[in-house]
């Protein structure tokens, strides 16, 4: 038997919802026998980070939260795992010589570390959609220049990636993103106006981190995904459709010029998309649920309502304008999301703030370099914070 080098992998954001699922997939796909874990990174939850690092034999564990260094060091004493803390340590860990990096930090905080991994030449398994929404073509170019592959993890984009026939890309007519509609799918705007973050985070089908759960309720998550799709699949805005599909079984679809539509289906479990990204272009056995079509009985579809979910309209505006509007929309939304979770603004104000910030910064010229993206991000946060006050 050939002596095979273990694949070197790192997981940025290992303590989150995607991160813990990724570790489970790695375990299911052969664990330490096949994968050498270089870096695991987290933020506040150093107890979980330490337990993960011990279990998979990681070379290094890094918390982005400098104040948690002592606690992490203590939790990993005697383990042989290297310990580091802070933003610079996170950047260094991201740039370790991994073959494959899971980008699963939430929000814009994930952009710079993911870029560091891309520059280093790793294959990027991209859960952090904010990278693409903010930096768009510059991000895609950075991964290509580094020499690694960009493999989508977001379930919709993984579905599209799987349904795209490589030699038929020229024959793609449209991308159909499915959306569950979230917990407020049938609610009126008046009913949504007073909801708290506790209510908004309860997703009917998926168990996810806080930000994406709130984003599913407001459909801001779908807005981000529309822009993500444009950059991943190089399609025009008018080729991107959204359809509400409450069961979350059809993960998304690709329509071709001959009228044919290819869909990818599965139970709502991110481990399928994560596994595909890990072993691409192969598939490996995974212990996840199987669809029972007789039990399912039906799949429903309905048109999205941009009146009740204005985030979808904002995504259209950002797609049409292009340039830095994605970065602005994303940063404004993140700022508004934090204010909503802190109880400072209402649920519906999130889209208002994002929309007003986009109008205020509609004049920004397209980004020439990554610094322009970070500058637009900072400016949008400043404008949005002003609106919140
Ligand atoms: P999460 O909140 O559960 O986990 C976030 C991770 O990022 C944690 O490890 C946390 O420690 C780390 N982190 C948070 N703030 C940080 C900071 N400032 N610096 C460094 N690290 C920080 O989030 P999640 O639901 O796992 O989502 C992660 C990403 O994947 C998001 O971009 C999300 O949109 C995307 N995504 C998630 C799902 C899902 O099912 N959860 C599905 C598709 C896409
Ligand atoms: Mg998704």
Image (tube, helix red, strand yellow):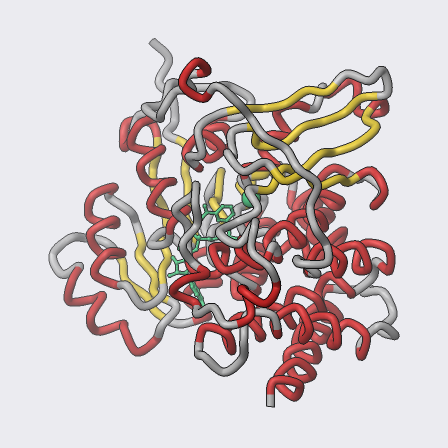
Which is more toward the observer, 281 or 6? 281
The x and y percentages for residue 156 are: 59, 37
Task: Tell me the residue at 20%/48% (across/down).
Answer: 54
Q: Quadrant of the C terminus?
A: bottom right
Q: Quadrant of the N terminus?
A: top left
Q: Quadrant of residue 60?
A: bottom left
Task: Tell me the residue at 54%/75% (across/down).
Answer: 346
Q: Quadrant of residue 376?
A: bottom right
The x and y percentages for residue 377 are: 67, 72
Q: Is residue 122 visible?
A: no
Q: Is residue 173 above or below residue 82?
A: above
Q: Is residue 292 above or below residue 325?
A: above
Could you tell me how many numbered marks the image carries?
0
Question: Splitting the image into four quadrants, where does ligand 1 fall?
Answer: bottom left
The x and y percentages for residue 263 are: 63, 23
The x and y percentages for residue 353 are: 67, 75
Task: Tell me the residue at 55%/22% (across/down).
Answer: 281
Q: Is residue 387 above or below residue 194?
A: below
Task: Tell me the residue at 48%/44% (across/down).
Answer: 101
Which is more toward the observer, 339 or 70? 339
Looking at this view, name the residue that lies furthest to the left.
78
Which is more toward the observer, 340 or 162? 340
Looking at this view, name the residue that lies furthest to the top.
1
Q: Is residue 333 above or below residue 256?
A: below
Which is more toward the observer, 184 or 317? 184
Q: Is residue 230 visible?
A: yes
């Amino acid at each position: 038997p050939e002596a095979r080098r273990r694949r070197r992998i790192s997981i940025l954001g290992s303590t989150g919802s995607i991160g813990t699922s990724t570790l489970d997939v790695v375990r299911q796909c052969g664990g330490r026998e096949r994968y050498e874990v270089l870096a695991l990174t987290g933020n506040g939850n150093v107890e979980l980070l330490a337990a993960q690092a011990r279990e998979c034999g990681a070379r290094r564990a890094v918390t982005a939260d400098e104040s948690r260094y002592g606690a992490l060091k203590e939790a990993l004493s005697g383990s042989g795992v290297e310990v580091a803390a802070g933003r610079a340590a996170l950047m260094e860990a991201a740039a370790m010589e991994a073959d494959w990096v899971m980008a699963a930090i939430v929000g814009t905080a994930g952009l710079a570390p993911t870029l560091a991994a891309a520059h280093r030449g790793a294959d990027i398994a991209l859960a952090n959609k904010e990278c693409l929404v903010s930096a768009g073509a510059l991000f895609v170019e950075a991964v290509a220049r580094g020499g690694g592959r960009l493999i989508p993890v977001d379930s919709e984009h993984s579905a599209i990636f799987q349904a795209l026939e490589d030699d038929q890309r020229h024959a793609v007519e449209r991308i159909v993103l499915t959306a569950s509609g979230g917990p407020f799918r049938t609610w009126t705007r008046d009913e949504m106006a007073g909801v708290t973050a506790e209510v908004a985070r309860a997703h009917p089908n998926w168990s996810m981190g806080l930000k994406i759960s709130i984003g599913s309720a407001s459909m801001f998550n779908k807005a981000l995904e529309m822009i993500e799709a444009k950059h991943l699949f190089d399609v025009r805005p008018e080729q991107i459709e959204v359809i509400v599909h409450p069961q979350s079984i059809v993960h998304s679809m690709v329509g071709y010029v001959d009228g044919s539509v290819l869909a990818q289906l599965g139970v709502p479990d991110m481990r399928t998309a994560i596994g595909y990204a890990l072993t691409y272009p192969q598939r490996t056995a995974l212990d996840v649920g199987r669809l029972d079509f007789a039990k399912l009985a039906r799949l429903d579809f309905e048109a999205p309502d941009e009146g009740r979910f204005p985030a979808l309209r904002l995504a259209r505006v950002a797609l049409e304008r292009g340039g830095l509007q994605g970065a602005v929309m994303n940063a404004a939304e993140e700022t508004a999301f934090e204010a909503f979770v802190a109880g400072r603004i209402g649920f519906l104000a999130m889209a208002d703030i994002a929309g007003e910030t986009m109008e205020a910064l509609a004049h920004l010229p397209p980004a020439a370099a990554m610094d322009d993206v970070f500058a637009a991000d900072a400016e949008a946060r400043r404008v949005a914070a002003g609106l919140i006050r």
